[in-house]
Amino acid sequence: MKAKVSRKAHFNAAHRLFKSDWSNEKNAEIFGKCSNPNFHGHNYELIVSVTGEIDEETGFVMDMKVLKSLIREKIEDSFDHKNLNLEIPEFKILNPTAENIAMVIWNKLRPHIEKSKELEVILYETPRNYVTYLG
Ligand code: NI
């Protein structure tokens, strides 16, 4: 018996999408407002899901208290109210698109989730734009 359990979380963060080897014009053309040289913020909404067998003893796929504190410690505490480009080491070399942020979040959580379980990260950059990353 398999089930998927999910936990919602939230952080506010600033970013700039930018490739240093492109002209300002090309950056503006490809990344639009997200390329503003002075950065800008998003209210990111995060949904982390774990899929796996329901434990016969506990009736849980995963203890949600554990998932909640994992997300708080590994993601919210380091990303919330930060400038992603300047303050999160991964984004010194990686453009902080929603795709790449979702991947970084997945990579940070994966080692702490049981190997037999699947991990899925959904990241909303705006209420209408979101990305799903499955590894
Ligand atoms: Ni943006």
Image (spheres, rainbow, N blue to C red):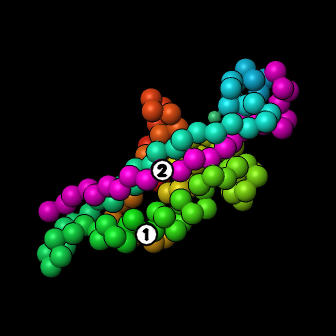
Relative to 62, does residue 28 appear above or below in the rendering?
Answer: above
Name the residue rendered at 48%, 64% in the picture. Answer: 72
**Does the rendering let one see residue 50?**
yes
Q: Secondary structure at mark 1?
A: helix
Q: Amino acid at mark 2?
A: His
Is 18 within the magenta? yes
Q: Tell me how far mark 1 sits from mark 2, CA to CA.
A: 13 Å
Of 41 and 112, nearer the camera is: 41
Position of the N terminus by quadrant: bottom left
Name the residue rendered at 64%, 39% in the picture. Answer: 41
Q: From the viewer's perspective, tell me whether residue 2 is left or right of residue 18.
A: left
Dot label at residue 10: 2
The disc, 1 or 2, on the residue closer to the chain's N-terminal end is 2
**Does the rendering let one see residue 121?**
no
Count the marks. 2
Stretch of the chain drawn in magenta: 1-25
Dot label at residue 54: none
Q: Secondary structure at mark 2?
A: strand
**Residue assigned mark 1:** 69
**Residue 60: quadrant of the picture:** bottom left
Residue 92 in the image: state x and y as whole percent: 76, 52
Relative to 13, does residue 39 appear above or below in the rendering?
Answer: above
Relative to 82, does residue 65 appear above or below in the rendering?
Answer: below
**Residue 54: quadrant of the picture:** bottom left
Q: From the viewer's perspective, tell me whether residue 81 is left or right of residue 6.
A: right
Find ligand 1 in the image and state its quadrant: top right
Q: Amino acid at mark 1?
A: Ser
